[in-house]
Structure formats: C-alpha cells, structure tokens
Amino acid sequence: MDNLKRRRGRPKISQDAPANTKAVLLRAGLTWLTTTGFNLSSLDNILRSVQVPKGSFYHHFDNKEDFGLQVLDQYRRYFENKLDRSLKNDSVAPLQRLKNFMADASTSMARYDYRRGCLIGNLEVEVATLPTAFHQAIIDTYHSWQNKVAGCLRLAQAQGEISPDKECQYLAEIFWIGWEGAVSRARLVSSDIPLHQFGQFFLQQLLR
Amino acid sequence: MDNLKRRRGRPKISQDAPANTKAVLLRAGLTWLTTTGFNLSSLDNILRSVQVPKGSFYHHFDNKEDFGLQVLDQYRRYFENKLDRSLKNDSVAPLQRLKNFMADASTSMARYDYRRGCLIGNLEVEVATLPTAFHQAIIDTYHSWQNKVAGCLRLAQAQGEISPDKECQYLAEIFWIGWEGAVSRARLVSSDIPLHQFGQFFLQQLLR
C-alpha cells in the first residue's frame, strides 16, 4: 500500500480482515520481543508500529500477557517447523541435518544483522520478572526442541554416525544449553563465530 | 542496627561514611541487576531498598548508566577473584581447579535459590537496549574471564592432563559460551543440573 496516498489518520491495518490483523500483530510482537524483550516492549509502541488501534488488539488478545504467550507459541511452532525442515530431511545423513539446522539459524541471525536473539533465550533471562505462565511455556518449548534434536541424534546413532554409548536425550539438552549461549554471544559480537565454535565443539564430541 | 529502635524516617545508610555508602549502593545494584536486569531496575527502588537519599547517590555516581557500569566493573573484579581462587590454587591439579570453580559457582546459585543469574549474561541479552558503553564492557569482561580459564587449560596441557593438540584459548571461549547458557538454564529450572551437564560434557571433550 502506498503510504503517501493513504488518508491521514486512517489506520492501515484495521481495514484488513481480522485474521490478517492478528497475524500482523503477532509478527510485530515477534520483532519487538526478540529485539527488546517482553518487559521493555510497550504495547502502545507495538500497535503504533503497525498502525493497529487498541480496539482491534483487544479483539484478538486479552492483554499484553496473553499477547506475549501467543507470540511465544507461534515462535515455538515456527521453530519446530524450521527444525523439522532440517532434521527430517531424509535426503541427507542425520548429523549433516543438524549441521544444516545450525547453518540455517546462523544465516537467519546474519539476515537480521544480529539484532535479534532467540525469543526463548531472551525470555529465559527475563523470567524472574514475567507473569508465571511464561515459565512453563519456556520449559515446554525447550523440551519440544530438545526432543527433535534427540530424535535426529538417535537416528545418527542407528546409522552408525555416532557411537552407541552416547545418550542422545542428554546430548540434545546440552546442545540447547550451549546453543542458546552461542546465540546470545553471536548477538553481542555481531558475528556468527560463536555459533560455529560451539557447533563444531558439540559435533566433535559426538564423533569420538 | 536494630530496625525497631531506629528513629522513624531517619535513613539507615546515609549516616555511614561516604565510602561505605558507595559500597552499600554497589551491593544493592548488584542484587537488582542480577535479578531484574538494568532496564527494569528503577533507581528509586534501589535507593529505597537501602534507604539512601538521592543526594548521596549523585555524590558517588553521575547517573544510572555510570552506576550500572560501576556495578558491572565491581562484578567483573569480584568474579576475577573468584576465578583466581580456584584456578590459581596450586595445591590442586589444573583440571580439578576448573571443576572446583564450577562447583563453587553452582553453590553460589543454589545459595540465592537460583533467583540470580550471571550479571554479564543478563546484560548481554539486554545489550540492544543498553547505553553503548555497556557493549564493550561486557566483551572486555568475557575476554578477561576467558583468559583466566585459558591459562588454567594451558597449565593442564603442560602437565599432560589434556592432549597437546587442543587449542586452549578456543576451548576457554567455548567454555564461557556454554557456561552462560547453563547458568541461564539453571535459573529457569531452579536446579544445578544444567551446570553439571554442561560442565561434564566440556571436561569429557578435553580428556579425549
């Protein structure tokens, strides 16, 4: 839509179908939450950034907490799909799939110029000051992501890529513990080096 | 001082010597910053928590940014001493020193009931919304801590505890990337298990 031709004061988004408005709000919420976190994201600023009036917002969400939880849920599912695309790609050997996921995540961070972190890792640090519902939602998200990586590692084990004495569930937990540290550091130094460093270290451990 | 006997309205701390007031403020700042982060820590609340009037605060600090940077600097040095106590304890073999540091850090987290994270890891996540001076201060702190761990690993290498083909500086960077992820996760799940998981994984990699 051409901003210059838009009538003054007329909200751009509220003219769209309600389902679309909700999608626009969730997308804006994701940008804000991965950049500045939950507590610092002002609802007024988010709504202003996409020109959605408050009335429309409250048509879709009970309050900021409900909105935040729905953004989190959408991010969790977005990332589950992202993981599945790499980890269930059976044209590639299992460990290569994990490498592909890391390369993909690394490309995504570079695309946003390392301004965005992982929404879950960010909220994890804020957790002491978040409504309690976030706590379980973050834990559940890690479980879901860890299970996907564990499944891929078990397949690698079955195919003889990693030794049979490795505990795949345990390794998947370590992967996510360290990967979140690497994402946070990559953002700090605006570089993918920490991602490669941790990824390489993790994979070397599997191969031995 | 007995709170019940204190005269009403009389500030508890401002009667102390200025140097002591500064120490009290830095200690309070540390508690707030490791619990709720920089952005959410209100100066008014911090001052109220230790009953220091604003005038005294501005006697020691230019503003909230200056205060935050001095808290960070004090934390960095506190942690450098903590690292030195473990890593330079030459009554113990080098790798055991690193284990001792991890055990010590783990005990500290449990002591505060996992409510406090690592000040540096917390600020790292907030970095996009912090005054720019924090950015370099966080990077410098990691360099300092990494160098200390690298020194200990080189000693372990010289004494044959880890193989000569390992790059100690690189491993020390990985240690801090993953350790910060583990500290953050330990806080989320109120347990030291993530710390042990990552620590064990890291050490296993060294020994192979």
Image (cartoon, coloured by chain):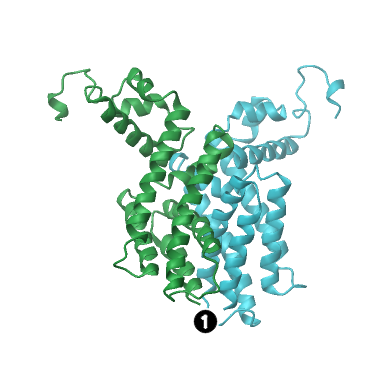
Chain colours: A cyan, B green
Which chain's residue wears label 1? A
Could one spot residue B197 in this view of the protein? no
Q: Position of residue B36 (x, y in %)?
A: 43, 38
Answer with left or right where residue A25 lies relative to residue B175.
right
Residue at image position (60%, 43%) is A70
Could one spot residue B143 in this view of the protein? yes
Q: Position of residue A96 (x, y in %)?
A: 70, 70
Farthest-out residue, left: B5
Question: Does B91 sit above or below residue B69?
Answer: below
> Which residue is under mark 1?
A165
Residue at image position (71%, 49%) is A110
Q: Position of residue B185 (x, y in %)?
A: 47, 54
Looking at the rendered structure, the secondary structure element under dot 1 is loop
Residue at image position (60%, 52%) is A183
B109 and B27: which one is in front? B27
Counting other residues with Cα less than 10 Å from the Cα at mark 1, is it few (<14), some (14-19), or many (20 or more)? few
Q: Name the amino acid type tagged 1.
A: Asp
Answer with left or right where residue B117 lies relative to residue A57.
left
Q: Quadrant of residue B21?
A: top left
Question: Does B50 sit above or below residue A199?
Answer: above
